Amino acid sequence: MEKDLPGVIAPPPLIFLIPFLIGYLCRNLLPRLGSPAIGSVLAVAGVAIGAWAFVTMLRARTNIAPYKPSTTVVSGGPYRFSRNPIYVAMTLLYAGAALSFRIIPALILLPIALLLLHFGVIRREERYLEAKFGDRYREYRSRVRRWT
């Protein structure tokens, strides 16, 4: 019997945390450039979007963690605009922290985190949701973009 899980390669926060920490450890290898003001705006936007997405998932009574079964297709709140608002929020928070703390190597490593997220998490979640919810998920996917 196949488990009712998407089979992601790692928890998404870990996918963001590891490249950020590597970037932090390499922070003195490149000039310390950035903008605390712009970084703060991005980070605050990330926290706001993430909180909105979490509350929406909790109200829908489905699991937020990708290593637990989904109980429904959530299409309200920020999920009207993005199929992955939590990942958008994590990306904004990552970029905001890197800019705020002037950690250029972390910004350079962000595309690697996004590739791992795309192929190791998002694509697996999408296959899982389509298999579990069928036409309901396909209809949602056809009208809402993955990222924005």
Image: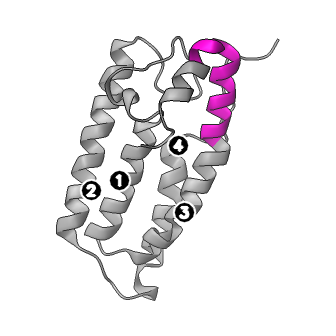
**Counting residues from the N terminus, which is met first, the one under dot 3 or under dot 2?**
2
**Counting residues from the N terminus, which is met first, the one under dot 2 or under dot 4?**
4
Q: Looking at the image, is 116 positioned above or below residue 55?
A: below
Q: Which residue is mark 1?
A: 92
Label 2 sits on what residue type? Leu
Q: Position of residue 45 (x, y in %)?
A: 25, 48
Q: Position of residue 49 (x, y in %)?
A: 29, 39
The Cα–Cα distance between marks 3 and 4, rounded to whole angstroms, is 14 Å
Q: Would you say residue 42 sits in the magenta stretch? A: no
Label 4 sits on what residue type? Pro
Q: Which residue is mark 2?
A: 42
Q: Which mark is residue 12?
A: 4
Neighbour class for label 3 at 10 Å: few (<14), some, many (≥20)?
few
Q: Are marks 2 and 1 in contact (CB under 8 Å)?
A: yes
**Counting residues from the N terminus, which is met first, the one under dot 2 or under dot 1?**
2
Q: Which residue is mark 3?
A: 111
What quarter of the picture does the N terminus occupy?
Answer: top right
Label 3 sits on what residue type? Pro
| Residue drawn where x is 61% and y is 47% of the image | 118
Q: Give the label, 1 or 4, closer to the camera.
A: 1
| Residue drawn where x is 63% and y is 30% of the image | 126
Q: Which residues are the magenta region?
A: 121-137
The Cα–Cα distance between marks 1 and 4, rounded to whole angstroms, is 14 Å
Colour scheme of the picture: one colour
Q: Looking at the image, is 60 positioned above or below residue 7?
A: above
> Which element type, helix, strand or loop, lies under badge 3?
helix
| Residue drawn where x is 49% and y is 53% of the image | 16
